[in-house]
Amino acid sequence: MNRYGQSITWGPSTAPALFTGSILSYSYRDARTRQLIEDATSDYAALVQHSQKADINFEARITEASTDFLDLSMGAKIVVSGVTGGTILATRAIERWQLLQPKTASIQATHYPDMTGESGASAGATLGAFTPDQSDLDIVLPGGELIYGTYGLGHAAGVVHGLTLEQQLTITEDDPSPDGKILGAASHAYLRTIQLDLLATGAIPATGTVLGVSGGPDHASGYRIESAELKFTTAKGKMYALAGVWIPALEAA
């Protein structure tokens, strides 16, 4: 790719990467909390801006090099190239498979510029996102470059048309300091959720039962079904939409 004319930054290729993949988008939104103080006539007499923090969003297409996707069960702290000072805590890590589309994944995180110190565990960059095994899929040329569609994923109730796995962490911030800065926070309440869309070929799974997807990564199993929806649409086959949840306590259940 060559650029001509005006000198601008084109595309996301130079953006920071939160895991290895083909970058689709990156954003960093710095903001402060607004507090308006009224006087005796109910007009605004003062403006206070405090509790500075920044939202980070990153999305990339999964490639054969995507072996470092974040494992938030290990911790929340991450490092982002170009973001200096303070602490960055990841809150969401999402993987998406969709029929006839490349697999994508995204990360949501928050940068606390006034939160210093080295305490707290880091997120693991250990999950291999290049799943399932598609070595027999011969429609992607050249082969082995990306995960395409839902080939290799399976469920007894139907053909997988879409799968979303999401890791979530709750971040509870400390009360602001007297000078309006966020100096500390706790990450806790790790859970995973699953969204599974199936072209129905069998009986719909019951709520409360265990849901897993064959061919998927290790963290695509052991969920408890919260909702099971039957859907009929014009010019489309009967579909099931399943949603489930997993928490670490279910590991031994």
Image (tube, rainbow, N blue to C red):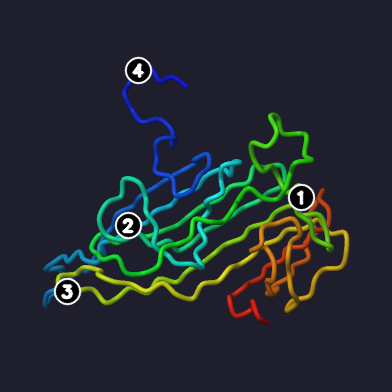
Between 41 and 239, the one lying in front of the other is 239
Q: From the image, which quarter does the C terminus lie in?
A: bottom right
Q: Measured along the vertical axis of the image, is residue 186 above or below residue 137? A: below
Q: In 3D space, how far apart are the residues under numbered discs 2 and 3 (Cα atoms)?
A: 31 Å
- Residue where numbered disc 1 is placed: 152
Instruction: Report the Cα–Cα distance between label 1 and label 2.
Output: 38 Å
Which residue corresponds to mark 3? 42
Residue 208 position, x and y percent, is: 73, 79
> Which badge, 1 or 2, is on the more N-terminal residue?
2
Nearest-to-viewer mark from 4 and 1: 1
Badge 2, how many Cα within 10 Å: few under 14, some, many 20+? some
In the visual, does 223 lie left or right of 155?
A: left
Q: Could you tell whether 190 is left or right of 185 in the image? A: right
Distance between the alpha carbons at the discs numbered 1 and 3? 63 Å
Q: Is residue 159 above or below residue 72?
A: above
- Residue depth check, mark 2 versus mark 4: number of the one nearer the observer: 2
Residue 142, horizontal then vertical, whole percent: 68, 29
Report the Cα–Cα distance between label 4 and label 3: 53 Å
Q: Dot 3 lies on which element? A: loop
- Disc 4/disc 1 C-alpha distance (Å): 46 Å
Secondary structure beneath disc 1?
Answer: loop
Residue at 79%, 56% (x, y): give it.
154
Which residue carries the number 2 mark? 54
Q: The disc labelled 3 sits on which kind of residue?
A: Ser
Of pointers 4 and 3, the one earlier in the residue sequence: 4
Of the two numbered discs 1 and 2 in the rendering, the one whose residue sits closer to the viewer: 1
Q: Earlier in the sequence, mark 2 or mark 3?
A: 3
Name the residue nearer the viewer: 93 or 121. 121
Identity, as a three-letter code, of the amino acid under mark 2 = Ala
Amino acid type, callout 1: Gly
**What residue lies at 63% left-to-right and 58% top-to-bottom?**
164
